[in-house]
Amino acid sequence: MSSETLDRGLVLEAVRVTEIAAIAAWKLVGRGDEKAADQAAVDAMRTALNDLDIDGEIVIGEGERDEAPMLYIGEKVGNGKGPKIDIALDPLEGTTLTAKAMANALAVMAWAPKGTLLNAPDTYMDKIACGPGYPAGVIDLDRTPAENVKAIAKAKGVEPSEVTVCVLDRPRHGEIMASLRSVGARVHLITDGDVAGVMNTADPDTGIDLYVGQGGAPEGVLACAALKCVGGQFQGRLVFRNADEKARAARVGIKDFDKKYDLHEMVRADAIFAATGVTSGALLDGVEVADGFVHTHTIVMNSSTRTVREVRMKRPV
């Protein structure tokens, strides 16, 4: 195994980890308790990671050490005997979705060789993403949303009115939505879960062509790992609301606060990405229990081989 590529054998290990976290979170679907659902997923994912033959370090996790008792940034996981890897994770992406039994909650994780994932601070990030098959540079964070829609439409050979853009439904995105609609684009709003939102651009079955908006920077790294595996494009720029957030960024090594990152700067080597559905959504079916068996649906990708697998697991409860 080279320093830039993870062993293919880790792919199924990644699946097992996200499956376990998803099943733990599923038990709290619709119970109205976001924190309990998140903690259940965190506990399960941490236990699963510590069973593996890896020397892992959390670079995108549940927060800084003083904020998160488990899976905090810098925490070592695994038994220390295997390859050195960076780990980005969100044991439950969509805590509100889970608490309310809404669609698109996921257990998500990405692995890459040590030192190759951006240590993104827990701040916001302006993002734009599209799936594979477009010329390099077709999207640009410094263009208006309307201009990016026109560029995607031109590359597809369609009118802007035939382009669908996924946007997180937040008041801060009012101007973005107005710009998109000014050229006739369809705006597909999601309530939560912007990792899933970005991933939707890579799956033609979702009908999503473009993702635009502001969301969590850690989630941006996770989404980049997924897009790297399928050849999509992404740009992001950190957004700081106060001096404390800039201090957070400085602590994880960010020096240029205005830098525009592309996908390959956020994930600098080949990665493995896995996501298991907690509740059913556009990409994945949720956890189901029937006739004494638990069923899960996972997507796992390996950028070194450009393989995308869908894994359906069934085991006794």
Image (spheres, grey):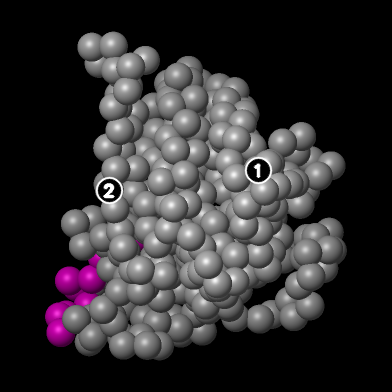
Query: Which secondary structure, mark 2?
Result: strand
**Residue pictured at 34% horizontal, 28% vertical:** 287
Q: Residue at x 27, y 48 (%)?
A: 310
Figure quadrant of residue 228: bottom left
Instruction: State the separation of the CA atoms marked 1 and 2.
Output: 25 Å
Closer to the observer: label 1 or label 2?
A: 1
Name the residue carrying label 2.
310
Q: Please state the horizontal and vertical placement of residue 99, each as a whole percent of the image.
A: 48, 26
186 and 234: which is toward the camera = 234
Q: How many residues crowd around disc 2 within 10 Å: few (fewer than 14), some, or many (20 or more)?
A: some
Q: Is residue 211 above or below residue 299?
A: below
Residue 267 visible within the image: yes
Q: Horizontal placement of 209 versus 127: left or right? A: left
Q: Position of residue 45 (x, y in %)?
A: 57, 35
Range of magenta residues: 157-166
Residue 259 falls left or right of residue 32: right
Residue found at the very far top of the displayed protein: 292
Give the residue drawn at x 23%, y 81%. Answer: 153
Compared with residue 186, is residue 291 higher up or lower down, i.e. above or below? above
User: 300 or 39, which lies in front?
Assistant: 300
Quadrant assignment for the C terminus: top left
Which residue is the site of mark 1?
78
| Amino acid type of the residue tagged 1 in the rendering | Gly
At label 2, the amino acid type is Glu
Provide residue 35's location: percent of width, then percent of height.
61, 27
Give the residue at x 74% y 80%.
Answer: 256
Decide whether residue 162 is among the magenta residues. Answer: yes
Label ID, residue 62:
none
Residue 113 image offset from top left, x and y in percent: 60, 65
